Amino acid sequence: MTFDDLPDNWPTLPLTEPRLVADVLDLVVGERDRHTGCIAVLACDSSVRLLQPMVIGEAPSTCEPQLMQRTVDIVVEAMSAQERAGTLILAFGRRAGLSVTAEDRAWTAAAVDALKETAWSLSSAHVITLDGSRPIPA
């Protein structure tokens, strides 16, 4: 996994192919954010093409549904101002390990709950560490 592998036209491609998603997450989530923990949110259009990446640094390791709700609310409000509805890709950054934890699943469930009252959906969720990235199974 490395952002050096991204094709020149990657911004126009849908983030549905696992290798491409991994490379884009490698670009968006820096080493510092992996060391300190983060939540990365990739706001994508309805075809899952990246519109705007965002990273919340030093995020808690324990799921905070209210934080996820606020995050989703901000993204949806900002993108709705541009008359857009689409999908989100989430990544939970931490220092090491690629095991999917109960907290990763809890954060993902909190995002799904936060999106229920919107026109947006969750495309995928991932763990990203200094060891690489891994999708969180639905």
Image (spheres, helix red, strand yellow):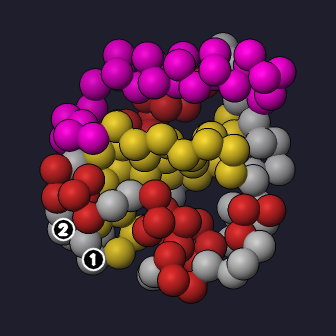
Q: Residue 114 in the image: state x and y as whole percent.
A: 53, 21
Q: Which amino acid does the dot numbered 1 rest on?
A: Asp
- Residue 67: say if magenta: yes
Total count of labels: 2
Q: CA distance from mark 1 to mark 2?
A: 6 Å
Marks 1 and 2 in Cβ contact (< 8 Å): yes
Residue at 33 percent across and 61 percent down: it is 30
Instruction: Identify the disc placed on residue 96.
Output: 2
Residue at 72 percent across and 62 percent down: it is 11
Q: Which segment is the magenta one?
A: 57-85
Q: Is residue 23 above or below residue 51?
A: below
Residue topped by disc 1 = 131
Q: Is residue 40 left or right of residue 119?
A: left
Residue at 75 percent across and 53 percent down: it is 49
Q: Earlier in the sequence, mark 1 or mark 2?
A: 2
Q: Residues within 10 Å of mark 2 (few under 14, many from 20)?
A: some
